[in-house]
Image (cartoon, grey):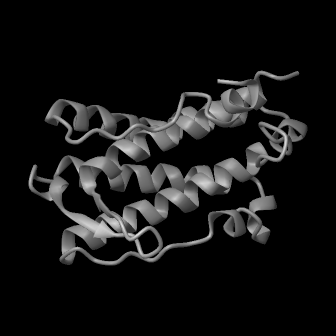
Amino acid sequence: MNNDDLLRYPIGKFTAKDSYSTEELQGFIERIENLPREIEKVINSMTIKQLDTPYRQGGWTARQVVHHMADSHTNAYIRFKWAITESTPTIKAYDEKAWAETPETKLDPVISIEVLKALHAKWSALLRRLSPSDFQKEFLHPETKKHMRLDRLTAMYAWHGEHHFGHLKIVANRS
């Protein structure tokens, strides 16, 4: 990987598997559950200047990353709810780049940390109560036309949180 790739993907790219064991899913759930505390720690260590620093040239600021995570993870939670309550629903796509530019993304990231704390508590409680067959349910993405199973989405969002946590650590470790 070149330096830009290391900044863009500090923990590497997500690689999906064909299936996941119960133990793997439990590990993903723990990672999702613990993420807000880790985000809060790193954000609390940052200066205002660091919050407004992008993790790479052309990337989002640390502030935008935290707001993005709240938006993205809220959408993921809703997608889980659709998939377990409807038969292969077509989810609503959204423009994450446009969402990262809405006015509240300039505000204190503590707002989104509080959202993540509540959301991840509720989300992990839901995930812990899903049956193995629930994790096999899926939704259809309207843009990619691909089906996404909930076990894979769980793995992807465990990765997604750590992926963006890696971006925040890049900024926090700069002087």
Q: Is residue 124 visible?
A: no
Quadrant in which the C terminus is drawn: top right
User: In the image shown, does 171 or 118 lie closer to the viewer?
Assistant: 171
Residue 132 % position (x, y)? 10, 49
Does 103 sit above or below residue 67? below
User: In the image shown, does 14 or 130 lie closer to the viewer?
Assistant: 14
Does 158 sit above or below residue 108? above
In this picture, residue 42 sits left or right of residue 134 = right
Task: Using the rendered view, name the quadrant where residue 140 is placed.
Answer: bottom left
In this picture, residue 17 sits left or right of residue 130 = right
Task: Using the rendered view, name the quadrant where residue 155 is placed.
Answer: top left
Q: Is residue 85 visible?
A: yes
| Residue at screen point 38% across, 41% down | 33
Does 142 sit above or below residue 19? below
In this picture, residue 132 sits left or right of residue 41 = left
Residue 48 % position (x, y)? 87, 41
Quadrant in which the N terminus is drawn: top right
Does 3 sit above or below residue 107? above
User: In the image shown, does 103 or 92 lie closer to the viewer?
Assistant: 92
Residue 39 % position (x, y)? 59, 37
Residue 92 % position (x, y)? 45, 77
In this picture, residue 159 sits left or right of residue 88 = right
| Residue at screen point 15% across, 36% down | 22
